[in-house]
Image (cartoon, helix red, strand yellow):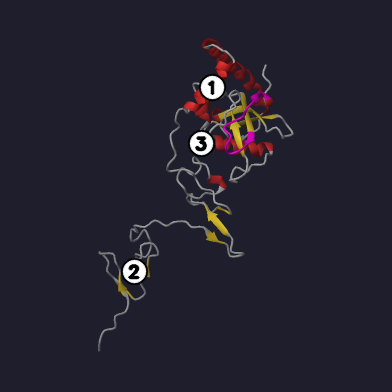
Amino acid sequence: MAEIDIGKHCQIDSCCQKDFLPFVCELCSGVFCLEHRSRDAHSCSEEPVKRASQNAVGGSTSFPCSFQDCKGKELLPVICSQCGKHFCLAHRHQDDHKCEKLEVQKPRMAATKELVQKIVESKDISKNKGRRGGKNSATAAKVALMKLKLHAAGDKGLPQTERTYFQVYLPKESKDSSQPMFFCSKWSVGKVVDYAASLAGLKNNNNVLTAKKLRLCHPQTGEALRMDDVLLSLLAHQVSPLYNGGDVIIEYLDNEDSGLENVTDYIRQT
């Protein structure tokens, strides 16, 4: 009687066990026995790719977060501009999802220096006076810092050594003109904006492509700070630093806007 050829041999060279109900890997399409059916057991060469899932009701599409062990989903795609992966709102910033393409902070762009230079020239301030002005700003910030520490709102769980205090000037349409707040010095500007919006009760549509974006702006130059800049680097900036105890401005800007035209609309100069 002829032998019936049923089942297949495991593709692992050291195994080759014949299994009557073999397992086929969905990623590499290999055939394996029960013992080697998992990706780790047969050292699968293919990586799983997360895809947008279809909800059972209504057939609407959701986008799962690519961050390890995160179960979050969004109805709209939230894609990192650097690594191109989908993330939930909690992990959309590069430092939050430990982006594989997170860049080391680079010096300010030449455009920033040019903007600062124009402001200095327009006010006819000499280099020496500019240095004195910087010292005056730093001194004023130290005095204001003591007051801010008494009233500022923020995450009470942050270590004192990591706290950075600002008088945050709010958008023109806000009920209050400003609020004292503190943030972690290791946070990115994007995370600072999100947290400030939450504390002040501001509408935050930064994840909506066509909406105006909440941006953090420099109190002297009006420049909209880059969302991936870290507070530590801005506090140590050589040309136009922020000061612990100083001011910042948060405002809604169109996508093409690079900053505010007139900071005196928010901060009264003395």
Point 74% across, 34% down: residue: 175
Mark in front: 2 vs 3: 3
Q: Earlier in the sequence, mark 1 or mark 2?
A: 2
Q: The residue under label 3 is which amino acid type?
A: Asp
Above/below status of 180 relative to 86: above
Q: Residue 64's spot in the image, x, y percent?
A: 52, 54
Marks 2 and 3 sit apart, C-alpha to C-alpha, by 48 Å
Residue marked by disc 1: 116
Which residue occupies the foreground of this view, 29 or 263?
263
- In x, y percent, where is residue 219? 61, 25
Q: Give how far across and how far down residue 216 sits, in percent.
A: 59, 32
Task: Determine whether 88 is above or below 112 in the image.
Answer: below
Location of residue 19 with respect to 193 vertically, above or below: below
Return the residue at label 2. Answer: 33
Assess disc 3: are there few (<14), some (14-19) or many (≥20) residues with their C-alpha within 10 Å of its C-alpha.
some
Give the residue type at disc 1. Answer: Val
Q: Secondary structure at mark 2?
A: loop
Residue 50's disc is: none
Decide which of 265, 135 is in the foreground and name it: 265
Residue visible at 46% across and 47% down in the picture: 84
Main SS, magenta residues: loop
Indicate whether 5 appears above or below 244.
below
Q: How far separated are the C-alphas under marks 3 and 1? A: 21 Å
The residue carrying mark 3 is 228
Q: Is residue 187 visible?
A: no
Q: Residue 96: tell me if it is visible.
A: yes
| Boundaries of the magenta span | 251-264
**Mark closest to the chain's N terminus, 2 or 3:** 2
